[in-house]
Amino acid sequence: MSVDFKKIKNYLMTGMSYMIPMTVIGGIFYAGSIAFGGTAVAGEGMVIKNEFLLHVQEIGAAGLFMMIPVLAGYIAYAIAGKPGLAPGLVAGYIANTEITIGGNAVKTGFLGALVLGFMTGYIVRYMKKIHYPDLIKTVVPILIIPVVTSFIVCIFYMYILANPIGMAMGGIESFLTSLSSGSKVVLGIIMGMMVTVDMGGPVNKTACLFSISMMAEGHYEFFGICAVPICTAPLGMGLATLLSKNKYTQEERDAGKASLFMGLIGISEGAIPLAVADPAKVIPSIMAGGAVGGAIAAVTGVKDYAPHGGPIVLPIIDEKVWFVIAIIVGTIVTALLANVLKKPIVEKADKEAA
């Protein structure tokens, strides 16, 4: 049985198109609240004291959280129609919520939402083909399919997928600890790739939590590494959409503008819509940019005294010049590599027509 990659791409694009407004709402309000009222405080991150701006930030946080369930929900909707939407939203919510299984806290973010969105969609599509008794046909799409699918997908995720992922993240944290006394370049490259690969997911979180734990011991250079790739992914992909407009749809270019703004405030999730649209090309690009930026920060001894990243924390950074250079170089590497790998929209359309 052959895989129809064109259909899979269409399902991804459907999820992305519904997710982008959530990303924009979340990014504008969350980043705006930090930009106008955030103060970088050593050991605490970006602190907002103004009550009104705190409420604005809550609106932004809601948008950023909801974009993951919306992604999963509308991927399932694209595959299976209306009956797939509700269980897809539920599955996406579970993927974006930290759950504890077997002693491991797991939150898989947008990568988990992608998997569960497709899984939900195909299960619902199969269930729609089953012949049901006439007595229950009317409740099948609003009761049986959503309830059964939600149970199957979420329990599978919690008890089959989540625990191994949690164990793997624990192993990665131990690996980072072993690297901390070795080569700074290697540490910077690995942490840079970890921060960018899933943009707020479990791998990103593991690298950041490791760095925060090292801050408690007085080692601020580890979050100095994290602070760079946190923003190179959204800044790089935003720049990419400006440099090669013919390689991105209008929706992607709009997402790129929001991504630039979010990158300046240190919100890595800004790049997620662009990664969802073309993961095979975008994720390697942002990982490469993160690796280069992370390596520069590591070698030059950049230190970040607040658990937050991006240009907005510049006032409390040690080695400010190198911090800025690392961000610029990582951003450029991300943008150039993404645009080298991606083909013009017209060219892709011609190939598909052929």
Image: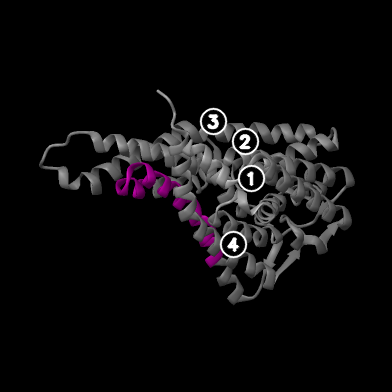
Q: Amino acid at mark 4?
A: Gly
Q: In screen coordinates, is 289 left or right of 281?
A: right
Which residue is disc 4 drawn over? 27
Query: Under tag 3, what secondary structure?
Result: helix
Tag of residue 205: 1
What residue is drawn where x is 24% and y is 35%? 129
Q: Work out whether mark 2 precedes mark 3 in sequence or the reverse, and give the earlier one.
A: 3
Q: Is residue 299 visible?
A: yes
Query: Between marks 3 and 4, how big is the CA–CA gap?
Result: 31 Å
What residue is drawn where x is 49% and y is 50%? 16
Q: Quadrant of residue 155?
A: top left
Q: Amino acid at mark 3?
A: Pro
Residue span colored magenta = 59-87
Query: Between marks 2 and 3, how big is the CA–CA gap?
Result: 9 Å
Crowd tier of the residue under label 1, counting other residues whose Cα lies within 10 Å: few below 14, some 14–19, many 20 or above? some
292 or 105, nearer to the observer: 292
Crowd tier of the residue under label 4, counting other residues whose Cα lies within 10 Å: few below 14, some 14–19, many 20 or above? many
The color scheme shown is one colour
Q: Work out whether mark 3 precedes mark 4 in sequence or the reverse, and give the earlier one.
A: 4
Q: Amino acid at mark 1?
A: Lys
Query: Under tag 4, what secondary structure?
Result: helix
